[in-house]
Amino acid sequence: MNSRVWKVRWTGALAAAAALLLTGAGAGAAAADPAPGASGSITGSSVTGTAVGWRALGLAVSPEGLKAYVVAADRSGSRTPVVLRTVDLRSGAVVAELPLAEDGAAGKPVVSQDGRRLYVVVADRLVTVDTAAGTVLSRTPAPDQARPDGWAAGALTGLAVSADGSKVYTGQNGPAGDGQGVRPGRVLVFDTGRGAFAGALPLRGYGVNGLTLQAGGAAAYVATDLGVEHLDTTTPAPTALRTVDRLGAATELAASPDGLRLYALGAQASAGTGYAVNTVTDVARPVFTFANAPVDLHYVAVSPDGGRLYLLKDSWTPQAAVLAYDTATDANLPGETLTGFGLDGVSAAAVAPGGHALLLAGIRGDGSYLRTVAL
């Protein structure tokens, strides 16, 4: 994505978005560019998009960019069934629905690099899906977590899958209870060949947030309430290397394609600040800070060419905006800000392969919808 100011163009029922993904070409500029500093806007009719359920919980895109996988909660009386819906981006139609659980919560899915497997945390289980057959292969509970009597096991959190698909890493919060102090969380490793959890690494922090693999897969980073931990993933179970310097509690992480930088969103006192981490030295520096912190920031992502850093601001409001930063200069690019999504709030986002499109899932009235924006 270059520095030219583009308007956002919605893709009706997503058919134009599919052409965009297939050809690698942009969706085209609007008739007139916005004035310098103005945000992007919807042009043409504002369609609803593709209905994906009551509440979209997570979103992933297939490696070739032809399908979107949306994990959603539906409503059925007092229950909230969890369903995986597959959207064909060539037609904009939901082409498959797969029940994952009769009730409960779920996280963001991840897809293996060959596109054959999808993994998602549903309640206390790691669910493995065969994407070609559209079937659940396994629902594997997390191994027991040492904890005092009466305490509940911590929730499973972020996910990452190794480049060769042989391992899946998931974070787990520390156990929850009252009056006996805080217990640390951990990272679990799932052996996909065996279909079983094969190791665990205790962490310093209790709350375990984002988890990402460095390019090449030899290292992982995990964000906790006490900072960001650098892990060695060449061993059967991950081992701790060091803590990122000058960076406290963090939430979400994204790695650059070349593996030389990691981006982290600050939490607690640092909410509203984003950091770049040198993965050679593990030293962090601020990239941006909003003066009116704390600020609602989510879904940090790096473009496939490494030139842009994206993040979603004010995601739970109709004023949600995607901000863009130049990774070479750390400069905000207001002419590339995207707004006006026509949603009451955005609950999931993903940059499509090739970096020419952004997929957003969010609430509109009584349902959730998937939309595509040209970058």
Image (cartoon, helix red, strand yellow):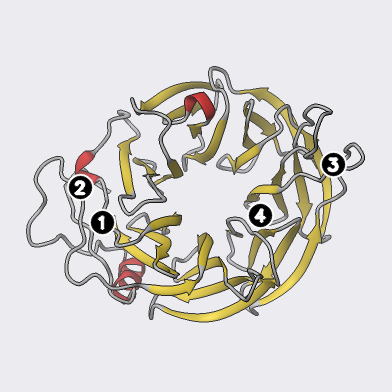
User: What residue type is disc 4 on?
Assistant: Asp
Q: Residue 358 sits in which quadrant?
A: bottom left
Give the Cα separation between the discs numbered 2 and 1: 9 Å
Q: Residue 186 sits in which quadrant?
A: top right
Closer mark to the observer between disc 2 and disc 1:
1
Q: Check whether the beta carbons of the residues at disc 2 and disc 1 lie within 8 A of each other.
A: yes
Mark 3: which secondary structure? Answer: loop
- As rendered, which of 149 and 158 lies closer to the eye? 149
Q: Position of residue 164 (x, y in %)?
A: 66, 54
Which residue, given by chain and number where applicable, does mark 3 sit on?
151
Q: Check whether the beta carbons of the residues at disc 1 and disc 3 lie within 8 A of each other.
A: no
Give the Cα separation between the discs numbered 2 and 4: 40 Å
Q: State the residue at coordinates (29%, 62%).
A: 342
- As rendered, which of 142 and 219 lies closer to the eye? 142
Where residue 340 is drawn, which disc sits there? 1
Q: Check whether the beta carbons of the residues at disc 4 and disc 3 lie within 8 A of each other.
A: no
Q: Check whether the beta carbons of the residues at disc 2 and disc 4 lie within 8 A of each other.
A: no
Q: Where is residue 295 in the image (x, y as percent from the top left)?
A: 40, 35
Mark 4: which secondary structure? Answer: loop
**In the rendered structure, which disc, 2 or 4, sits on the residue that comes first in sequence?**
2
Q: In this view, does 13 lie above or below 181?
A: below
Total labels drawn: 4
Closer mark to the observer between disc 2 and disc 4:
2
**In the rendered structure, which disc, 4 or 3, sits on the residue that comes first in sequence?**
3
Q: Residues within 10 Å of mark 2 (few under 14, many from 20)?
A: many
Which residue, given by chain and number where applicable, does mark 4 sit on?
164
User: What residue type is disc 3 on?
Assistant: Trp
Where residue 325 is drawn, which disc sits there? none
